[in-house]
Amino acid sequence: MTSAAPPQPRPDGERPADRTPAAATLLRTRSGPLALDPPAVVGVLNATPDSFSDGGRHLDPGRAAAAACEMVAAGATALDLGAESTRPGAAPVPADEELRRLIPVLDAVRAAVRVPLSVDTTKAAVARAALDRGADVVNDVSAGRFDPELLALCAREGVPVVLMHMQGTPATMQRAPRYDDVVDEVRAFLAARAADAEAAGVRHDAIVLDPGIGFGKTVEHNCRLLARLDALAAVGYPVLVGVSRKGFIGQLVGGRRPEERLHGTVAALALAVAGGASLLRVHDVAAARDAVAVSRAIVRTA
Ligand code: HH2
């Protein structure tokens, strides 16, 4: 899974093009292994008043726990809990407020389900408190850039970390996103952040990369990253994709609201699986599970 053994000749005689270690096919977490093949379906639970899609719905611990149970029953193999919205234009939330929202919800969800839980935060203090209370994975949309303590914390605790690309900050990122070559720049950024994480002591097989769909990107940038996901998967780490109900899907289907973006989301999920995604961060778990089953069955015959 993580060995640095040289690439083996394939049965057809060709050698793999790159010499990076193979991407992990499972993530080792404190709640057990999280299989990545078939891709993991990661249900989104936001303990926020203002998230773009489920804002206000999961602030109450009892409702969050019920939603968590429903998502697991529908096929989620992990859940991602956040308490700070990162939607375009969102203002930062102080750590004490983030903890005030997160901890009661995390406690209730942890007591209700056994699947690995990730905590969606950029702050080491929030991640530390969440890990102490049963979270298993850190999902950092800043890839360790906003808080210099975060990667060292993940290394010390031995937990997997998701490193996501973002141009700018949530408050500014959609003002005028610009790239010379979005695929090259995102790939180089993620490879460098992964190298920093490993230098901080995070294991190779505990790192997940994420192109950050919608984080400082135009519709065209998002489409290009999804079309060339293979280039990101070739960096040698599992890739997480978060397209669920996002703005670019609404724009591609004539300006639909978040709750009307399911069909567009499923199309993007299927293509993400075809491009090599190993984790899908979604609001609509049952639809994602079916999209994974069908797209993976097709991909496997290629
Ligand atoms: N997207 C959102 C939040 N966290 N984390 C990763 N790794 N990848 C993503 O694409 C991603 C993420 C935004 O979605 P959501 O949590 O539903 O909304 P909000 O940021 O408004 O809470």
Image (spheres, helix red, strand yellow):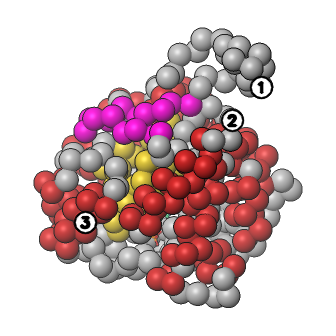
Task: Identify the residue under disc 3.
Answer: 70
Along the polypeptide, which appears first: circle 3 or circle 1? Answer: 1
How far apart marks 3 and 1 lie (CA) works out to 42 Å
93 in relation to 147, above or below: below
Where residue 167 sits, quadrant-wise, is: bottom right
Give, as a single range, the part of the protein colored magenta. Answer: 23-37
**Residue 275 appears at what percent x and percent y?**
66, 48
Foreground: disc 3 or disc 2? 3
Residue 225 seen in render: yes
Residue drawn at x 45%, y 60% as measured from the top left? 290
**Residue 236 appears at what percent x and percent y?**
62, 31
Residue 271 marker: none
Q: Residues within 10 Å of mark 1 (few under 14, many from 20)?
A: few
Dots 2 and 1: beta carbons under 8 Å? yes
Q: Amino acid at mark 2?
A: Ala
Left or right: where does residue 78 sit relative to residue 146?
A: left
65 in relation to 245, above or below: above
Dots 3 and 2: beta carbons under 8 Å? no
Residue 17 marker: 1
Q: Is mark 2 within 8 Å of ligand 1?
A: no
How far apart marks 3 and 2 lie (CA) works out to 34 Å
Residue 142 seen in render: no
Q: Nearer the viewer, residue 240 or 181?
A: 240
**Residue 147 appears at what percent x and percent y?**
47, 48
How far apart marks 2 and 1 lie (CA) works out to 9 Å
Residue 234 marker: 2
Residue drawn at x 66%, y 24% as measured from the top left? 20
